Amino acid sequence: MPELPVDSVGLVTPQTAHFDDPLALACGRTLPAYDLVYETYGTLNAERSNAVLICHALSGHHHAAGYHDADERKPGWWDAHIGPGKSIDTERFFVVSLNNLGGCHGSTGPNRENPETGRLWGPEFPMVTVSDWVNSQVRLADRLGIERFAAVIGGSLGGMQALQWTLAYPERVASAAVIAATSKLSAQNIAFNEVARQAIRSDPDFHDGWYTEHDTVPRRGLKLARMVGHITYLSEDAMGHRFGRDLRADDLNFGFDVEFQVESYLRYQGDTFSSSFDANTYLLMTKALDYFDPAQGGDLASALAPASCPFLVVSFTTDWRFPPPRSRELVNALVRAGKSVSYANIDSTHGHDAFLMPEPRYQAVFAAFMDRVAGDLGLETRA
């Protein structure tokens, strides 16, 4: 068996929590029952005070760290920051990471059976919002016996969930980290999401969301949606440094086949994504992004009044999807609301995807925040 890295949480097994209590949703509908798939890393202490919740981004899931088997080529999506001695140190913290409702990696969503009809939910799965996710996460915390999280942490769409936790359940959050996120999408961001959705919905294989019953997948639409999205996740500098205007061959073809390396890369990303992600889930997740706005168009500082915990807000210089001014807007509103907040704008060439990367300064800031979380709880801190 291949040897796993010493700073890895090692082999992990997803777990499923089933809930029979109906969940009322913001859209006015109710889920009669549902499953949440999750993973845990580390050990919950006797006081149950060292739990950390990881909230995932649009295409994320429960597998945030470690390996499902010894042959897995890549670890969980946030493995750079979760594990022994890492920023979220599993020798101190008990980490919970889940796949949200509406997801396509095991939790109840469009690709799961609707118990009332016996067919897959498909396009009939109800619209879900960030507040719905947080409400379901509270029930998971109750199931695990966690009354208060030492920290709720998320990047991008996950950061929106962390923020919502502090507003809806302030007594259950000791600290929050909002990374590469925003309190609401700009019109440009909503526009990008709409282009992605239309790419999927206009695919002839979409069949109004019933593609599974037609034994097909809207791969072309999903591929285009991912290509558009992926462009917004990277910075111009990162794309230029990695690809430039490099050609795949020595000469121009004067046609529409792949000629530039960046074209090849985007098509590969689109093909890979279209083989692993559910189209209806993509539609739901982007709508949840669009809908999030705790201030509802009003004063953000007033909307943040319920929050009572200290915050870490992190942005990245080349992130043009959720640029630093959006994070500063949140920070300024937290300050006006009288909240404790630390802010770091990290110099990075990786664009929005920088929140996933092991940037040294980012790691230092993140680790210092988690050290403070541990210190506030009386947990042993690193030497």
Image: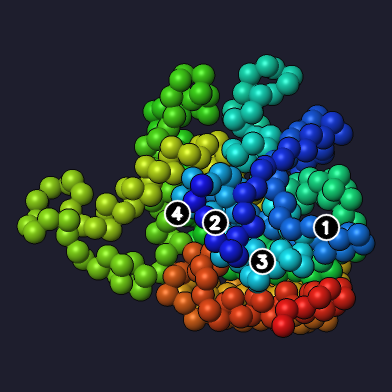
According to the picture, the residue beneath numbered tag 1 turns out to be: 44
Q: Describe the element under mark 4 as helix, strand or loop.
A: helix
C-alpha span from label 1 to label 2: 23 Å
Name the front one of labels 2 and 4. Answer: 2
Q: Nearer the viewer, residue 155 or 18?
A: 18
Task: Say if 213 sits above or below 374 in the image.
Answer: above
In the rendered image, which quarter is residue 13 located in?
top right
Q: Describe the element under mark 2 as helix, strand or loop.
A: loop
Q: Amino acid at mark 3?
A: Pro
Q: Describe the element under mark 1 as helix, strand or loop.
A: loop
Q: Amino acid at mark 1?
A: Leu
Q: Amino acid at mark 2?
A: Leu
According to the picture, the residue beneath numbered tag 3 turns out to be: 84
C-alpha span from label 2 to label 3: 13 Å
According to the picture, the residue beneath numbered tag 4 turns out to be: 229
The outermost residue toward the front is 1
Task: Say if 61 sits above or below 280 in the image.
Answer: below
C-alpha span from label 2 to label 4: 32 Å
**Circle 1 Cα neighbour tier, 10 Å, few/some/many (<14 / 14–19 / ≥20):** many
Confirm whether residue 377 shows in the render. yes
- Of the numbered discs in the image, which one, if any, rests on residue 4? 2
The reply, left or right, for residue 146 in relation to residue 178 is right
Q: Earlier in the sequence, mark 3 or mark 4?
A: 3
**Circle 4 Cα neighbour tier, 10 Å, few/some/many (<14 / 14–19 / ≥20):** some
Q: Nearer the viewer, residue 373 or 273?
A: 373
